[in-house]
Image: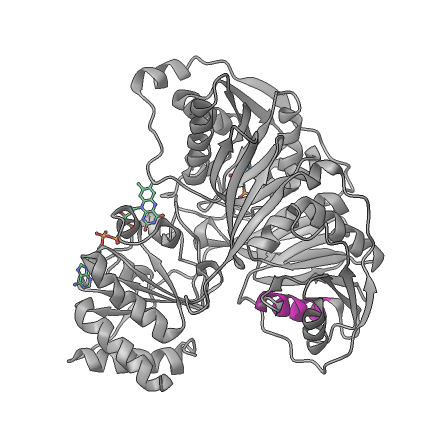
């Protein structure tokens, strides 16, 4: 059995998002030793995207040449993905589990008549079925789902899979099949994109390291201590609801039940008590570090490593040590 | 504007999760299912639009076991929704997000709908598959991860933002449209006691979800596992802050291997 896999390339800057490379890695594993892996890219900026796919061993690339599809609603793109999946005879379509991929996956699944799962951290075949594992209940448990029916759409959780090491190839490039897009799907218009300013650190949802601060920082100006540590680590900044409710930092940084869910490799909680509503947003992080001056704080029960101490002393020392070790 | 808001009964955040004895899935026995976080915010968003646009109505729908849907729907009525519909489905159907979307469609097609609003469940499955699947089933445009949703009366269009990895996108879309909200209000309105009491007697309409072809695509839970209990943090012993910092950085790079 050499099931063919289609990977949907997610545009990012001039090339592809890192999570696309991770998805290509899983695609190679699931397609078998020499099973076919194809890629799909948008027309704009496709030259570097195609080159990148080649570097990760993708031998065949379909390119969407219809400018109407890009910048249109996810519906138009989903139709294009479904058509490309049928063209390459895929059994599995993989997307990165980012906003882009998670939003698209359900639509592609219906358009292509497939079973779907979002945010997989482990994938393997079980005969004709596909087993997909992922954290649920805000990281308090993991669930393995069995996908049935022979056609599957899966998005992979960022950082869950390694970037593949394969001999680079020079992929063949062909035009993706263009189907008619119903006019209703072309009604919405994108008015603009404000790019995330470079130098502002990685986005919360996508970051490998997140440094979050809580009420323990006591005043908005002190939150800078959290931001400096994040910047030294190349990490994204998060916050507890105590901080966002007080208006010390914008609500977009809030981690937890009514904020963002994050699952980085490393989560550092500073001056955060560990209320359940905060924990459900960060508990599937791989390693959790807590800094809190109350040795009985509940955050220490879920953390892997803890420092009981005054954040005003510990955090600057930590920032200095990180800078020293990284030579910055 | 006729607004349909889709509400998922989810286990209370304080619930102790445990697997069934056969290990295949979450054991719902004794678990309280509630209208949670993001869906509460979806109701809030629907009510804000209703208040801003004269002649609007909000229809709440929910799919699942009847005891759970009715709880959630009555909460929505108490908050100010105008009608409630429970979608009954076989248990297998409400375990697969695409089947859930098909059930939601069955109810939505029987209701006036200019705008279909969904939430995002951070306390539960976090699939995010339902808005897109529902959009495709209804043949309507959909957008997930939406923030700052507004109605622009002049252009008769929705305006909203989406925060993606690429940046902050801004969009406008004509009706009808399916919108999955990313935003949560920290303080959605709470129901008043008389409204709660009245909601106990509110009528709840019933719709049956279609059953898919037996060989069709679907998914089922195969294993539900709790992580090994976190035994509590390994506390770092130190005399000076500098020593604490050195020790932590060493542990993170050598033991935990997460330090770049
Ligand atoms: C429906 C609902 C939804 C919610 N959603 C969220 C959510 O999404 N996200 C969220 O975060 N919360 C949420 N909450 C709020 C949550 O219950 C907590 O109130 C909140 O997380 C507390 O934030 P905190 O840990 O920063 O503050 P606190 O609980 O006040 O903790 C501050 C901590 O700082 C420590 N500290 C103080 N001074 C120092 C010092 N000098 N050095 C080191 N440590 C120090 C203290 O020991 C304490 O542990 C929600 C609540 C409800 C009811
Ligand atoms: N059983 C359900 N009944 C009603 N709405 C649902 C159901 N399941 C999911 N939804 C809607 O889809 C959104 C996303 O759910 P999920 O895909 O599980 O994250 C929820 O916030 C609801 O608005």
Query: Residue at the spot x=40%, y=58% of the render?
Result: A283
Please tell me whether residue B107 belongs to the stretch shown in magenta. no
Residue A254 location (% of width, % of height): 36, 52
The answer to whether residue B130 is left or right of residue B32 is right
The answer to whether residue A214 is left or right of residue B239 is right
Q: Main secondary structure of the magenta part?
A: helix
Residue A276 visible in the picture: yes
| Residue in front for this viewpoint, A321 or A175 | A175
| Residue in front for this viewpoint, A175 or A319 | A175
In the figure, residue B232 lies in which quadrant?
A: bottom left
Image quadrant occupied by the C terminus of chain B: bottom left
Residue B159 location (% of width, % of height): 52, 38
| Residue in front for this viewpoint, B20 or B200 | B200
Looking at the image, is B179 positioned above or below residue A293? Answer: above
Image quadrant occupied by the N terminus of chain B: top right
In the figure, residue A157 lies in which quadrant?
A: bottom right
Residue B218 visible in the picture: no
Q: Which residues are magenta?
A: A18-30
Looking at the image, is A253 positioned above or below residue B132? Answer: below
Residue A277 location (% of width, % of height): 34, 48
């Amino acid at each position: 059995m050499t099931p063919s896999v289609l990977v949907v390339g997610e545009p990012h800057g001039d090339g592809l998002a890192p999570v696309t490379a991770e998805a290509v890695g899983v695609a190679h594993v699931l397609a078998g030793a020499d099973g076919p892996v194809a890629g799909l890219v948008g027309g704009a900026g496709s030259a570097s995207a195609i080159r990148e796919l080649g570097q990760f061993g993708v031998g065949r690339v379909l390119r969407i040449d219809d400018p109407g599809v890009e910048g249109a609603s996810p519906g138009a793109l989903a139709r294009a993905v479904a058509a490309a999946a049928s063209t390459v005879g895929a059994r599995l379509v993989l997307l990165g589990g980012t906003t882009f991929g998670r939003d698209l996956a359900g639509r592609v699944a219906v358009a292509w008549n497939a079973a779907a799962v979002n945010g997989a951290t482990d994938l393997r075949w079980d005969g004709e079925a596909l087993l997909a594992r992922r954290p649920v209940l805000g990281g308090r448990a993991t669930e393995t789902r069995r996908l049935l029916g022979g056609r599957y759409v899966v998005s992979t959780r960022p950082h869950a899979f390694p970037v593949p090491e394969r001999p680079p190839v020079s992929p063949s490039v062909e035009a993706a099949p263009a189907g008619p897009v119903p006019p209703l799907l072309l009604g919405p218009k994108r008015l603009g994109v404000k790019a995330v300013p470079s130098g502002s650190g990685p986005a919360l949802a996508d970051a490998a390291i997140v440094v979050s601060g809580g009420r323990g920082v006591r005043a908005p100006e002190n939150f800078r201590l959290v931001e400096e540590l994040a910047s030294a680590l190349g990490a994204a900044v998060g916050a507890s609801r105590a901080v966002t409710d007080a208006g010390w930092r914008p609500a977009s940084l809030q981690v937890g039940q009514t904020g963002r869910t994050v699952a980085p490799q490393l989560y550092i909680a500073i001056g955060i008590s560990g209320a359940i509503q905060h924990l459900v947003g960060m508990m599937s992080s791989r390693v959790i570090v807590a800094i809190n001056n109350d040795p009985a704080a509940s955050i220490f029960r879920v953390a892997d490593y803890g420092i009981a101490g005054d954040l005003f002393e510990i955090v600057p020392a930590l920032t200095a040590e990180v800078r020293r070790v990284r030579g910055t | 504007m006729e607004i349909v808001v889709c509400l998922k009964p989810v286990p209370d955040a304080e619930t102790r999760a445990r697997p069934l004895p056969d290990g295949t899935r979450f054991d719902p026995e004794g678990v309280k299912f509630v209208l949670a976080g993001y869906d509460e915010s979806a109701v809030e968003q629907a009510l804000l639009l209703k208040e801003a646009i004269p002649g609007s109505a909000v229809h709440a729908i929910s799919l699942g076991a009847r005891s759970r849907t009715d709880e959630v729907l009555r909460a929505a009525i108490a908050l100010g929704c105008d009608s409630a519909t429970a979608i009954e489905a076989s248990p297998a159907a409400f375990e697969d997000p695409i089947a859930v979307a098909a059930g939601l469609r069955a109810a939505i097609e029987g209701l006036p709908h200019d705008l279909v609003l969904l939430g995002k469940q951070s306390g539960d499955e976090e699939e995010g598959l339902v808005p897109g699947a529902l959009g495709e089933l209804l043949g309507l445009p959909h957008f997930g991860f939406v923030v700052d949703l507004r109605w622009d009366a002049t252009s008769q269009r929705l305006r909203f933002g989406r925060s993606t990895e690429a940046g902050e996108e801004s969009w406008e879309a004509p009706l009808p449209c399916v919108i999955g909200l990313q935003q949560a209000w920290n303080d959605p309105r709470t129901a008043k006691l008389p409204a709660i009491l009245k909601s106990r007697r509110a009528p709840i309409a019933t719709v049956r979800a279609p059953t898919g072809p037996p060989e069709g695509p679907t998914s089922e839970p195969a294993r539900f596992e709790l992580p090994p209990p976190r035994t509590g943090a390994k506390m770092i012993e130190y005399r000076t802050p500098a020593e604490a910092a050195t020790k932590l950085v060493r542990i993170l790079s050598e033991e935990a291997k997460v330090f770049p």
